[in-house]
Amino acid sequence: MKALVYTAPETLAFDDAPEPTPGDGEQLIRIEAVGICGSDMHAYLGHDNRRPAPLILGHEAAGVITGGPRAGDRVTINPLVTCGDCPACLAERDNLCATRQIISMPPREGAFAQWVAMPERNLVTVPEDVSFAKAALAEPLAVSWHAVRLGLEALHPDMPRDALVIGGGAIGLAAALALTAFGVEDVTIAEPNAARAAFLTERCGQNIVTAPEGAFSIVVDAVGYAATRATASAHTRPGGVITHIGLGEDTGGLDIRRMTLQEITFIGTYTYTAQDFRDTAQAIFDGRLGPLDWIETRPLEQGADAFAALRAGRIATPKIILEPWA
């Protein structure tokens, strides 16, 4: 099969790769759409030692089951593979499974390829009227759905329902959409990139600021740098909640003294539970997350150029979807 292979920092090769062989309880999926994630970019830059080269990246995918009784079924893929038997899995907090694996990290190759094998329990059926490109958004949208759900569960019921999202990339925009779907009407996105800010305002109808002012009950850090954590610390209302998704850099930024004195809750959030993924997929199918028309599609063979353009800041669109069979 053809695949986009990460071979060295800032180097991707569109080349032949072994076709995956499904194991017990797995299905072989022909990939029709796969998104470029911030974590893929992190690996591409050589900043993620969990993803050593050579490796097929990509984990935001949708496609068609090939072979067996479900051949032809259209599915979106939950890329997080868990054991199903540990205390975390039994508590339906399977994203905390101690033996979790995710495609695009060894030992599982990713979905920047024509085929991938996945456990059947990781597949969600996609209706015929939903495009594969939209279905592939289930994974990044689920990340933000999970973070928003946890933040709202932690927020005192008497607190005002307003939110600040730091970062207007796909995860930040997804957080804003999830907040709206959960009934938060006052949502602001802080995005300093002028081209992206214009896109989010004009195409997505979002309330965008370059730098936030005032305080918010919920602050979602969708970037994860020391500077964005400092912004989150400064702009969370006393008694409010910070939900932290971004993995930009490991340390720095949090004003622990202010967070302590003002009883600000900090929640680190990782991926999503299987139920969050299913709920997000259903919200896509129902239209509760909007038209999701803010994506750009390119052939997988042009993936290296797409990564380079993203690296250079030349793309305003929040999400690039690659198509292996285009």
Image (spheres, grey):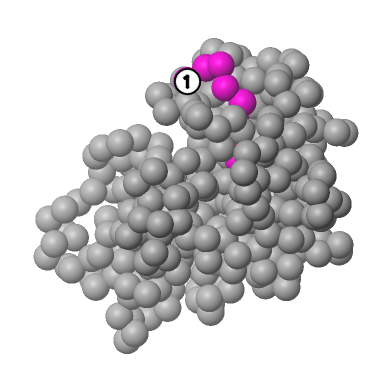
> Which quadrant holds residue 104?
top right
Magenta-highlighted residues: 52-60
Asked if residue 317 is positioned above or below residue 41 in the image, the reply reads below
Of residue 151 and residue 91, the one placed in the foreground of this image is 91
Q: Mark 1: which secondary structure?
A: loop
Residue at the location (32% across, 73% down)? 154
Does the image show residue 275? yes
- Whole-percent x and y of residue 22? 67, 38
Query: In the image, is 5 to the left or to the right of 134?
Result: left
- Whole-percent x and y of residue 265? 25, 65
Residue at the location (56% across, 72% down)? 180
- Whole-percent x and y of residue 2? 77, 23
> Which quadrant holds residue 266?
bottom left
> Which quadrant holds residue 236?
bottom left
Does the image show residue 207? no
Of residue 167 and residue 156, the one placed in the foreground of this image is 156
Residue at image mark 1 = 52
- Number of residues whose C-alpha sits closer than 10 Å to that of mark 1, classed few (under 14), some (14–19) or many (20 or more): some
Residue at the location (49% across, 28% down)? 106
- Whole-percent x and y of residue 95? 43, 54
Name which residue type carries label 1: Pro
Of residue 168 and residue 67, the one placed in the foreground of this image is 67
57 magenta-colored: yes
Q: Main secondary structure of the magenta part?
A: loop
Outermost residue to the bottom: 158
**Could you tell me which quadrant the C terminus lies in?**
top right
Count how many numbered circles sit on residues in the image. Answer: 1
Query: In the image, is 112 to the left or to the right of 301?
Result: left
Of residue 121 and residue 318, the one placed in the foreground of this image is 121
Residue at the location (26% across, 37% down)? 251
**Could you tell me which quadrant the N terminus lies in?**
top right
